[in-house]
Amino acid sequence: MSGTWITTRAWLLMLPLLIVMVAVIGWPLADTVQLSFTDAKLVGTSGSYVGFDNYVRLVSGNAFGRTLFTTTFFAVVVVTTEMVFGVLAALLLNQQFYGRTLLRALLILPWALPTVVNATLWRLIYNPEYGALNAALTQLGILDSYRSWLGEPGTALTALIVADCWKNFPLVAMIALAALQAVPRDVIAASYVDGASAFSRFRFVTLPYLAGPLMVALVLRTIEAFKVFDIVWVMTRGGPANSTRTMSILVYQEAFSFQRAGSGASLALIVTLIITVLAIAYGTAVKKVAGSAT
Amino acid sequence: MSALVVDNIRKSFGEVETLKGIDISLESGEFLVLLGASGCGKSTLLNIIAGLAEPTGGDIRLNDRSLIGVHPKDRDIAMVFQSYALYPNLSVRRNIGFGLEMRKVPVAEREKAVAEAARLLQIEPLLDRRPSQLSGGQRQRVAIGRALVRNPKLFLFDEPLSNLDAKLRMEMRTELKRLHQMMKTTVVYVTHDQIEAMTLATRIAVMRNGQIEQLGTPEEIYNRPATLYVATFVGAPPMNILDVVATNNGLLVAGSDTVIPVPPSLLAGLPTGGSLKLGIRPESFRAEAGGLPLTLRCDVTELTGPELILSGSVGSQRLVATLPPRTRAPVGSDVTLSLDVEALHIFDGETGKRIN
């Protein structure tokens, strides 16, 4: 069998999938790129070619910079918190104790909830009139009067971050727990005999086994956090005073609220580009970490 | 003064008692092998000595200091694991020096100790590699190096050679023996391989069901096994066990007319008419006359090169004899072999305990 035939056959076998991918990803993407260079509205005319005007206007406007900062801040805080709490929870659940299986099952619940349900629950908790958080804090004497956690620009983003961490740290915990169970018992035993402290044991023995899986969790969570939309939309719609507006919300506002399809497309492409760069950077890092741990 | 004392050590997991009162006392520099089939409790005992498991009862003393409740790192022991248990992301150099690093030994001193261990184990060129870049034999050397470098009072080995291929295993066995002769540190070594046990040990403890069946030098274990279990566990091919009955003329092989004419002095100590087990090692048979004669029917012969393995039968009972390669033993014929009185191991049929 000649090499050409093998190559041809491979392409033939992949062709159906290629067609589907071009149809559902390639074509809309090309359409978006084309749209981003026009001043098209959501309804009405298809708009006329305006070159890089949309990009220039967006990037030089102050909404873009502020939103990019908010999004980055949200992503960094959320992912860091989730990684730390996820690993701590995994280390805890990897110990022998009574009720461990039940606790492990409970842990996954927040993550198993649909985002919209989780967001609605937290909105109830944060409710300025009958929310549990207000009740708890005033009854404990920490707070004098009820506050509108989601209604004040100073607290809304923090409240959102807490809600997102609550939902997503179990994923990191589960990945870390699975990785912990793959740490050979003999290696742990050897570190005891060698006199490693708990921290050294974590640093030199456990962490290398965790690094690869955690890197994957980091990539997944960063990309998800960067394009976060649903939890924000349900809880604050980007408000108050745009204090919780993330990139995806901005895209939505531009394209649908202001009905500017052209510049909405430009913005969507910018977000896509940022995420692609992140994904590639992380992908390289994952390969490096995975290579060193084995 | 004994270096290591294991005093009535017990261990239970719930209802199951894995160690039923183990007593061992070792002199400094001894090489003790815990030998037994899997599940006999030998690894549990080793883990208790290491401090990786707590005993349910009893005491362990190293140089007269009780180790109960002492953290593994403070026991002055080093352990080599079956799976090598190297730290995958650390270089060979740091793997070997890890114990010293954790004990905050100064860098210069640590480097010197690592270099010395590497020289002894001939792994100097590997010091900057990661464990994943090493072969099984090299990893095992690193694991031994990591134990050696600490210069502990007691070495523990948990089946260290069982993941190696046959040729490497023999090499490392010799290497371990050489190291022990040089370092003269007390060793407790767990294995299920009787050849390892016989070749390495100064004393062997044969374990079964959480108890010590026999504790003795390799010669004692081999030449005077205390129980039927020890007799059949040590030796390859395994010892022949025949059902016999003591009569006035000698030992009557059950299910046949054959009587082995043992001297009256031996017979006097045996219960007449009771059921006995007679153990004979395959290599104790001789082809030439001169001892106690035993005639058996030759069923199969196998020439391995240095010896001839004869499988035969006396009545309905089977026997194996290893003989010089030139022995004439036509298949299907009766062959008369001879035995020395010392080669007879007589056990109680009920308890399995040695009688003679």
Image (cartoon, grey):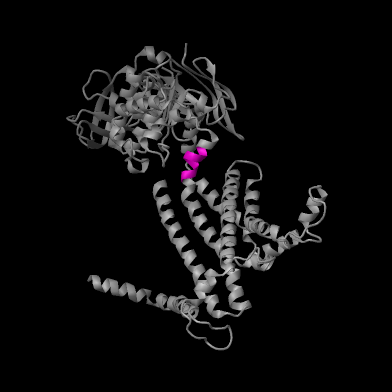
Q: Can residue B72 be spotted in the picture?
A: yes
Q: Nearer the viewer, residue A236 or A285?
A: A236
Residue B268 horizontal/vertical position (percent): 41, 13
- Location of residue B183 with respect to B310 vertically, above or below: above
Residue A203 is inside the magenta segment: yes
**Would you identify the image quadrant in which residue B78 lies?**
top left
Q: Main secondary structure of the magenta part?
A: helix
Residue B10 horizontal/vertical position (percent): 57, 26
Residue B9 as seen in the image, left or right of residue B185? right
Residue A156 is inside the magenta segment: no
- Location of residue A82 with respect to B90 vertically, above or below: below
Give the extent of the magenta segment. Answer: A201-208
- Residue drawn 52% across the image and 72% down it: A268
Q: Nearer the viewer, residue A171 or B198?
A: A171
Residue B297 horizontal/vertical position (percent): 27, 33
- Location of residue A189 with respect to B9 vertically, above or below: below
Count how many numbered circles sit on residues in the image.
Answer: 0
Q: Nearer the viewer, residue A229 or B239?
A: A229
Q: Quadrant of the N terminus of chain A?
A: bottom left
Extreme residue in the bottom direction = A45
